[in-house]
Structure formats: structure tokens, C-alpha cells
Image (cartoon, rainbow, N blue to C red):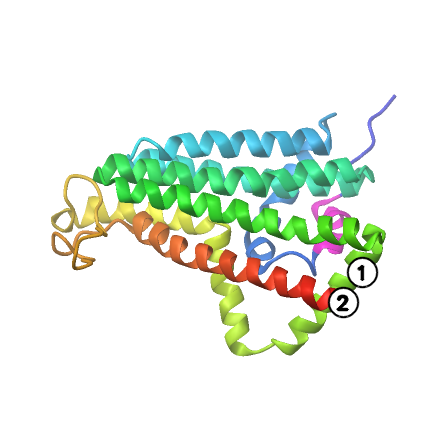
Amino acid sequence: MSKRKIESIKELREICQRSEANRDSWYDVIFFRKISIYFTKLLLKTKITANQTSGIAISIGIIAGVFFVFGNYWYAFIGALLLCLSHIFDCVDGEIARYRKSASIAGKYVESMYDYIIYPFIFICISIGLYNLFNNIFILILGILIALFMCWGNIASNLVYTVLVIETKNSTNKIVDKQVSEISENIRKRHSKIRRIYNYIKIWFTFPVLPVLIATILDILFINYCPDYSVGKLAIEFRPNIVFSIFNYGIEFNFLYIYFFLSVIIISSRNIIGIIDYFNQLKSYSK
């Protein structure tokens, strides 16, 4: 029995990606969806399922995190490349499900686990690596805090639906329809240049795939071509002194640490605001 011929890349984009075009961020549309479809075509020739692909994505993401722990810029670069590969497989699982029409609630659950597991884990691993590099416990504490804020934000988002289902005794679909309607209305009201700029920036810090790769590349270039501006490895260090000092030893850069520190500020504040917004949504829903 001959195997079914897989469509061309152009046809596969129509089948596997078109329905996601409005939901994907510019981040995926410009970069990862361009690459993921080639992996999808390759895996469609095998018996690997969408759920197994999700498992591969999570496994590669965990391995990527381990490489950041060593505090070595080449290992960090390898970790960043693996993180990109992990995110590509995270795109591929949905494409396989759409092609084979095997999408399910259980599959969506497995796919959603990627964001909940990998991104907090990556930030913790980066903080351990930076701690090994700088020997500053403050960095490690920040890594744990940013991971906690990401988890708390996800929990708060899910609790909105859990509380509404239990307390209002409505079906999940009815609640989701109302929430989507309210979110769409909010988007229309907030459709401004400032909001678009905020959403653009938010993606770079919420999904640390390309930014981490760019930071590690810059670090490698800097340590090799500007050695006079670095100490041993890579360094711009923030310390919680009495007078908060950004530059402790002159102009010494670690781009990964700069990104990490900005991520702490943006992600923690975003999730605090989000938790407050969810509370206000529940108050308005009850009215």
C-alpha cells in the first residue's frame, strides 16, 4: 500500500497555518511559522502524533534550560538555539493536529503545558547561570521571583474561568463567549499606538526565545571583539547596594543579564496588573 503524498509547502501553509493567522503573534508569523512548516512536512511522513510532538518540544526546552545553568556564553548560545528549536516544535504540534484533524481538548491541554513549564523554567536556569557568573545571590532571587510571577499570572487567568463555572453554574462555552466578547471590546477601546507599542515590547519579554538568542550572540561577539570591555567572561552587573549602582566596574556588558533584568521588571509588573484586572473582570461580570 503506497503512502499518501504530502502536499507542497505552500499547500501545507494553507491547511495547517491559515486558521491560526489571526491568533499568532507577529513573533511567530515572521519567524517561527516560516520554519515550522518544513518540520511539519517531515514529521507528517512518520507516525509521530501531535501530542508526542508537544512532548518533544517540552523535552528540548528542558534540555535548553540546562545549558544556561553553566554560566558560559557558548553554552548559553547552545541553550538559546535549543530553545528556538523547542518553540518550533511547539508550533509543529498544532500544525500536525490540524492536518490530521486530530485536535482535541486533551491535546490542547498538553500543548498549553509548554508555556506553563518551559518559560518559568528557562528564566530560573538563566538566573542560575548568571549567579554562577557573577556570584550574586540577588540574581538567583530575581530568577525565582520572575518564575513565580509567571506561574501566578497563569493560575489567576485560569481561576477566572474556574470561579465563573462554579459560582454562576454556567457552561464553560457560555462564559468563554462572554469573556471573548469583553476582551474584543477592550481591544477596540485600547487600539492606540501606545498600546501597540506595549504589546510589541511585551512579546519580547514574555516569550524569551529570539531575545535570548540575540542576547547570547551579542555576548559572544562582544567578548571576542571587545575584550577590553569585559572581565573574564561577560559582565554588566546590577547590585542591591545602599546606592543602587548599575555600572560597578566601568563599561562591562552582559546582554543576557540586561535582558533578564528588564524581564524581571516587565513580567512581574505585567502579572501584578493582570491579577488586578482579572479581579475587576469578575466584579464586572457579577454585575
SS at circle 1: helix
The image shows residue 244 at horizontal and vertical percentages of 20, 58
- Looking at the picture, tell me which residue is in the foreground, 133 or 94: 133
State the residue position of label 1.
Answer: 177
The image shows residue 240 at horizontal and vertical percentages of 22, 52
For this view, does 192 lie left or right of residue 250?
right
Residue 14 drawn in magenta? yes
The CA span between labels 1 and 2 is: 6 Å
The chief SS type of the magenta part is: helix
The number of numbered badges drawn on the structure is 2
Q: CB under 8 Å between callouts 1 and 2?
A: yes
Residue shown at the point (28%, 47%) measured from the top left: 219
The image shows residue 144 at horizontal and vertical percentages of 40, 41
Is residue 170 positioned above or below 113 on the image? below
Rate crowding at label 2 as few (under 14), some (14 to 19) or many (20 or more) other CA atoms within 10 Å: few
Is residue 145 positioned above or below 246 on the image? above
Rate crowding at label 1 as few (under 14), some (14 to 19) or many (20 or more) other CA atoms within 10 Å: few
Residue 58 in view (yes/no): yes
Residue shown at the point (33%, 48%) measured from the top left: 256
State the residue position of label 2.
Answer: 181
For this view, does 232 lie left or right of residue 16?
left
Residue range (magenta): 8-20
The image shows residue 200 at horizontal and vertical percentages of 51, 64
The amino acid marked with disc number 1 is Asp
Residue 138 occupies quadrant:
top left
Residue shown at the point (60%, 51%) measured from the top left: 156
The amino acid marked with disc number 2 is Ser
SS at circle 2: helix
Residue shown at the point (21%, 44%) measured from the top left: 224
- Looking at the picture, tell me which residue is in the foreground, 279 or 237: 279
- Looking at the picture, tell me which residue is in the foreground, 51 or 123: 123
